[in-house]
Amino acid sequence: MADAPALGAGAAKAAWRFDPSLAYNDRAGWRGPPRPSDRPPPYTGSAMQITRTPGPDSTIQLEIELPPERLSRAIDDAVRRLARGTRVPGFRPGKAPRAVLERHLGPGAVLDEAVEHLVQDSYREALVQEEILPLTNADVDVVQAEEGKPLIFKATVQVPPDVHLGDYKGFNFGPEIDTIDDARVDKVLEELRDQNATLAAVEGRGAQDGDYAVISFVGSRDGEPFEGGTSERMPIILGQERLIPGFEANLLGLEVGGSTEFDITFPDDYPETELAGQVAHFAVDLRELREKVMPELDQDFIGTLGDFADLDALRADVKERLERNALDRARHGFADQIIDYAVANSTVDLPPILVDQEVEVMHDEFRASIARQGITEEAYLKALDKSDSDLHAEFRPGAEKRVRTLLVLSKIADAEGITVPDAEVDAEVARGRERYPDDARLQEYFSSDRGRSYIRSTLRRSRVVEGLIDEWLAAHPEQGPLPHLEDMPGDAHDHDGHDHDAANATANAAIDATDPGSILQDVPAEDVPTPAG
């Protein structure tokens, strides 16, 4: 150790942050303190006095006092370590005495080295003795570190919050299933026609809402064109107001080859502040104009959609698919209601650090979402005149709800004795690898210990909610089955749920996050002492 901490006489006021691996388990993610067999503390002969005081925001303060002889032995060890790692002229490695080392490294180097190591080791002992499950790094303040006196330090430890469950089964609501009538079927058939429509050139009339137009325009202020106000060829759908409000209305009635000029006022909240609230003049030429032509609902069109004998057969298939989707939506909506009910009846003191982490997860999800639309975060923030801090403030209420929900569902899983075998986690990892073979980050995360903990927690929470639904359905046979889409015959189901899970996992992977729900479960019993009551 070539460079010792230069705390000197200020050692008594020093603070360290501890390695989070103190609370990490290779198999299950976050775990309890290390067992004595994991790393036997080097000093076990003298008693350690611990005063435990509950703190705010799911913290515990430990005041730890070690007898002078333990500090003395730690100093002897520190001299040996520093001697081995420090080049001192005239001395072979490991042979320099303490006085020489302190002249070379500073008068407090040996004491600081001894205190740092002794604090680390005794902190581990205290976690085991007090049966504390650390959630994050500990904040440590050394109160007294003088030779011949007891070593005294305080450690503020963030621990998993207490979750007090209320009622989560006695709800008086049930699933709400949409009625599929002829009007719903007609709407789908119209959508199918629209999806298969073609565009034809407009002849013999002027432009109207719904037409597909290609225009060129020049915008000016005080007779001078302004930046971004000119286009040689811009496609628009009239009536959708994709441009400045009121712009497209000035094009109605115009025929291909025609031109028009008009003044228009930019909205006060227009992103380009130099134009906001300003009047501009536009000269517009209509280059192309097409209209949507939808196919007739005849046998020729029906044949392009599948093997349907006639319109009645198509309508029957559409209705069956809509009914399957309605059952799936009802199950998901019912699940959301049950979750909201359970969370509303529970009490959780949310640790800020878990909320902060979930804010980062949501930020990364948002970043990925706008990237898929070809928008950079920098451009988005500039357009809306926002900062990262503004985004985090917007995300925070949602992050708090997420964390609270994850913790409550994990607590219910504890109460219901729900576990997820390793084989199911392995199977889910294999499915993730197969489904997203080109996502290197997601592949690595799912294969990691923390990623496996995320998968296990997700499966466990899902099993909690599905179990509550099935239990309610068993008690209300008049309701009838309420299957998931993927559990029904046919090929109607989509993968929106899977894609959401993948997006959330990717965001967790991006910041190396720990699933808040995993800190309360999936820990092997032999690894975690039973929490003190």
Image (tube, rainbow, N blue to C red):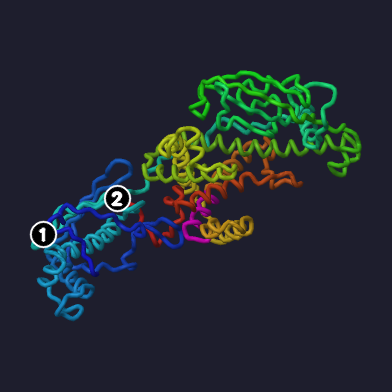
Q: Along the polypeptide, which appears first: circle 2 or circle 1? A: 1
The residue located at (42%, 46%) in the rendering is 357
Q: Residue at x 76, y 46 (%)?
A: 490
**Can residue 327 be seen?**
yes
Amino acid beneath label 2: Val
Give how far across and how far down residue 93 sits, in percent. Answer: 20, 79
Query: Residue 12: x, y in percent?
Result: 15, 54
Locate residue 354: give its quadrant. Answer: top left
**Count of all numbered marks drawn on residues in the image:** 2
Query: Secondary structure under badge 2?
Result: strand
- The 10 Å Cα crowd at callout 2, few under 14, some 14 to 19, many 20 or more, is many
User: Which residue was labeled with disc 1?
Assistant: 146
Inspect the image, locate mark 1, and give the three-letter code of the amino acid beneath it.
Answer: Glu
Q: Nearer the viewer, residue 33 or 142?
A: 142
- The outermost residue toward the front is 223
> As drawn, is 366 to the left or to the right of 77?
right
Residue assigned mark 2: 157
Observer-nearest residue: 322 or 478?
322
Query: Alpha carbon of mark 2 to alpha carbon of mark 1: how far?
Result: 24 Å
The quarter of the picture where the N terminus appears is: bottom left
- The residue that appears at 72% across and 46% down in the rendered structure is 488
Res 70 visible: no
Reply above or below: 240 against 487.
above
In the rendered view, tell whether residue 18 sits above or below residue 213.
below
Q: Is residue 423 magenta?
A: no
Give the extent of the magenta segment.
447-460
Report the predominant secondary structure element of the magenta stretch: helix
The question of residue 452 being in magenta is answered with: yes
* Crowd around label 1: few <14 · some 14–19 · many ≥20 (10 Å): some
* Secondary structure state at the residue bearing disc 1: loop
Residue 527 is marked as none
Of residues 354 and 383, the one drawn nearer to the viewer in this rendering:
383
